[in-house]
Every structure is written in structure tokens, then in C-alpha cells.
Image (cartoon, rainbow, N blue to C red):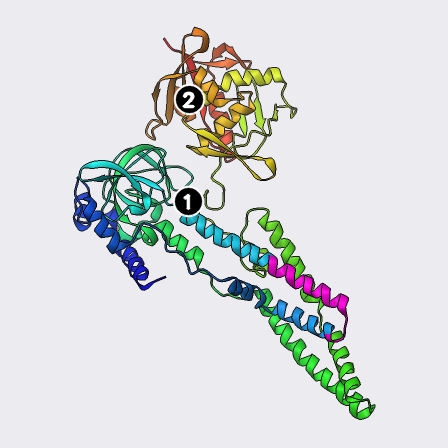
Amino acid sequence: MTSTDAQKADVQIQVDGPVHWHSKGVDQVLRELETYVVGLSDAEAAARIEKFGRNEMTPPPKKTFWMKLWNQINNVLIYILLVAAIVSGILQEWAETGLIVAVISLNVTIGLLQEGKAEKAADAIKSMLSPKAIVIRDGHQMEVAGADLVPGDLVVIKAGDSVAADLRIIECSNLKILEALLTGESNPVSKVAEVIEGGDAVGLGDRKNLAFSATQVQAGQGKGVVVSTGNGTEIGKIGLMVGQQDAVKTNLLIQLEVFGRYVSVLVVIIAAITFCLAFLKAGEPVGDAFKSAVAIAVAIIPEGLPAVVTISLALAMQLLAGQNAIIKQLPAVETLGSVTVICSDKTGTLTKNEMTVQKLQTSAALYHVHGVGYSPATKDIDGDDGTNITEEKRARLRAMFEGLVLCNDAGLQVAAGPGGTEVYTALGYPTEASMLTLGVKLGISDVRRFKDAHPRVASVPFASENKFMCTVHDAPHGGGRVVFVKGAPDRILHVCRDQVARDEVDAAEPLDAGFWERAAASLSGEGLRCLALGFAPWP
């Protein structure tokens, strides 16, 4: 990093450091950032880029190949193996020498590959900054590169956008942002423009008048003023931490170092005694006495121990790599294996922030849905008796629950995965995306085409105060219109008169509210999130 870049990085961090933007009013924020309701001018924006730097993370100093190679060789495991290889070569034990060299090469190769993956993880965080942003400059909206944002810029955000910098919200309408990346909160956070008092005492997840860089806008729209860019953003600080590596020795390395010192001292003492006895007592020539001492030393050195340890750690590292775990240094595998308790604050921190429909409760039966995540590859659904349902029963359930697909604003994105697999990613709320997966499992092969066949003509979006979502759809082939409503069971039961009978969508019977309340309580007691679905012909 050049001195100029370092100065810019310092300025960026200072902008967001001691200033509690969430505890300041909109007028005060605009005044301190010297911006206006019509935004900055192009000239002022260019001047601030020169002052604060571009909205990019400062990359850590790149290590050369030789530095990376030294990091992999510089541990006691490799030292013991190298000594054993040299001594074996001196004694012309070529098979043993080749085996030890192969073990060293395997260890170094795997370590270099894993360190490369760690660097890619840091680059991935850097790439999370939004490539584009809508800003207001000189009173006009325009699209600019995310890297060109500066403190004081007015940014317009809407559903589907990725926030390009840390913003102080100044206007918003039903604005909800998914912040699981930073706070672990699995649900989108409703944003406000009002002042939040408390300063440092307010946690990151409670600063609801701030929008953080690299988070995703799930609903609504808003306007904010940039308060921090580049390394000064919350995601930028994480990027800096990922790029830093503390040289901390694991317990395994410490124990091996102590063992290695004891063995080294013991080997030197015994080798010296052996040489003296062979040369002075037995009268052997100096060369033969030296060979005898070396032979004894080789026999004492436990060259098999570091080899076994290295191979074991390498295999464990490869196993973890297959599960998308990144480990920079080989001995860290042992430390990870010693962990007995992991403390986490909430879902989304260690979990994948994915939802899966696991059970379907009807008036006739409780169905168990198999599978994990958004992939519909596993389509097995069991009835009360534990056996897989018939296709006729699946068609009935599809007719009953197709409203979960239609009364839904989410989407599923499919991409090619390793080994020819398909990777499904949620676009929108995880809960709603899980219902699209359920629809596919119930027989709706093409969700988009199914929605096109039942066009939406009206809707009431979900709101926390209402706890439900409502949509009206045209039935195919001129079959009239139908209204679907999904939401909290207590809200849906309140507006229902009948319930589906015998799992036949056209058969109805009087609503048994007590039955549904007990069923919801039972499912909630298992840690499941419960939603109810209702429908009726549109008058």
C-alpha cells in the first residue's frame, strides 16, 4: 500500500469511527457531511474521491510464492521430517528418503492450496460491494459505479438492490433489508429514518436507521446518505480482519516442539556416546564410528510420528475442504477438532439462513416433508402411517397448497453446482422461498409458468402489524378469480368460516378452531415456524 492509499484508508475509517450516525437527526447528518437535499455536484463528488478514496476495500499485501512456501515449511513437523530425510539420504536409504520427501511435498501442496482458498474468501468479501448504485447529484438521479460513491452522496435503494455503502436512512417506505451477513438476523429488518438514541450502547443489529454495505434490500424503497465507504464500512472492517493472520501456535505444535527438543538433546547425547565407545573403546576407524553413531541417531528419531501426524491432518483438511471449510495452516485442524462448545447468538450466524417446509397439517392428517434446503430433489412426503403418499394424494395436496406458491413474492435461482448438481438460491424471504420448493415437491414442475397461468390482479403485501399477505388471482380458462391469504394462524383463523374436509379442496366443513390452535401449538413446540393458508372465490 502506498503512503497516499494509507492516508485515504485512515480518513475513511475516521469518518465512521467516533461518529454515531444513528443517534443524529437527518438535518444534523446532512449538515455534518456538507451535503444537500439535491445531492452533491459532480465536481464535489470528484473532490471527495480524491480526499476519501474510492469506495473499495484496501487489499492486504500480497504474499509471494516463496513467502507462502516458507509459511508451510516453517513448523516443527517439517523440520523433523527434513532431518530424517537428510539422515536417511546419508545412509543411502533411498526408499525411506523418497517416502519422507513425498510426505513433505503432500503437506506443502495441500497447505498452499488451502491458503489460496483463504485468499479467495477475502476477495469474495471484497467483491460483495455493489457494482452499481443510484445516486442523486445536482438534483437528478443517475447510475454510477459503486466504487464512485463518496461520503455525503444521496443514494436511492429499492427491493432487489445491494447496498453499496453504509447509509444513514433519511426517507423510507416499507423498507426491509436482509442483514444476516453482518448480524446473523435471519429475518429482514424494517428500517426507519428516526433518531435512535444510545450511541455505542446500541448494537449493530438495532441501528435500524442505518443500511450497511453488501446487505440486500428485500422490500420497499428508501433514500440514504453515505456515511462510510471502503474500509470504513462494517463489511470493510470484516474484510480487513479476514486479510489479517495472527501467528498463533496450536497446542499440537507446542507439544511437538517440546517433544522435538527433548528428542534432539537425547539423540545428540546418545550419538556422542556411541561415537566415543566405537572409536575409543572398540578401536573402529573414525568413519565407521561416525556411521555407527548416525545409525543409532536414525533409529532414535521417530520419523514415522510426524509423517503419520502430517498425513492425518492433511486428510482431515481435505475432508473439511469438501464441506466448504477454509483452513490456512495444517496444524489448525487439531485445534478445530478440540472444540467442544461453540457459543452463537442467533440463527444465521452458524446456520445457512435457509428455511425448509417440514410438515403439512390438514384437517385429515399430518404430513412429513423430506429434504433440506431449497433443492426439490427429494420429493418424498410421508403420511401419518409413515409411508410415502400416493400420486393421487400428492395431487390433492397440490390443489390445497398451491396458494403458497401464488401468494408469494420470492423466487428460486438455479445454478450449476459441482459434480453436475444443481444449487438453488432464494431470491426474497427464506420462508417464502421454502414454499416454492414445497410447490415443486407437490407437482408444480415450473413455478414461473404456474404463476403466469394464474396472474395476480391485486395484493396486500405482508406487514408486521397485519401478520398476513393477501393476493387475488385469475383462474386459468376463465374460471373466475380466487383470493389467497397466508400468515399467522391466529389472524387466518379469525377470518375463516370453513375448513377443507377429507383433503378434498372442493369439500368443506365447519371450522374447528380449537383443533387448529392445538396443532399450531404442537408444531411451534417443536421449534417450527407455523403459517396458515386460506382461500375463497373472489365475489
Q: Nearer the viewer, residue 441 or 12?
A: 12
Report the span colored magenta: 90-109
Q: Identify residue for label 1.
A: 181
**Where does the image place residue 311, in percent across and percent down from the top left?**
67, 59
Name the kind of residue labelled 2 in the image. Cys
Q: Identify residue for label 2.
A: 407
**Where does the image place residue 221, in percent across and percent down from the top left?**
29, 33
Using the image, determine if residue 507 lies above or below residue 23.
above
- The mark nearer the N terminus, 1 or 2, is 1
**Where does the image place residue 472, in percent across and percent down from the top left?**
38, 16
Q: Nearer the viewer, residue 50 or 247?
A: 50
Q: Is residue 339 visible?
A: no
- Residue name at image x 62 percent, y 71 percent: 79
**Where does the image place residue 184, in percent across and percent down from the top left?**
42, 44
**Is 362 left or right of 165, judged from the image as shown?**
right
Rendered image: mark on residue 157: none
Using the image, determine if residue 55 lies above or below residue 517.
below
Where is the C terminus found, in terms of image quarters? top left
Query: Judging from the image, what secondary structure is the residue with disc 2 in?
Result: loop
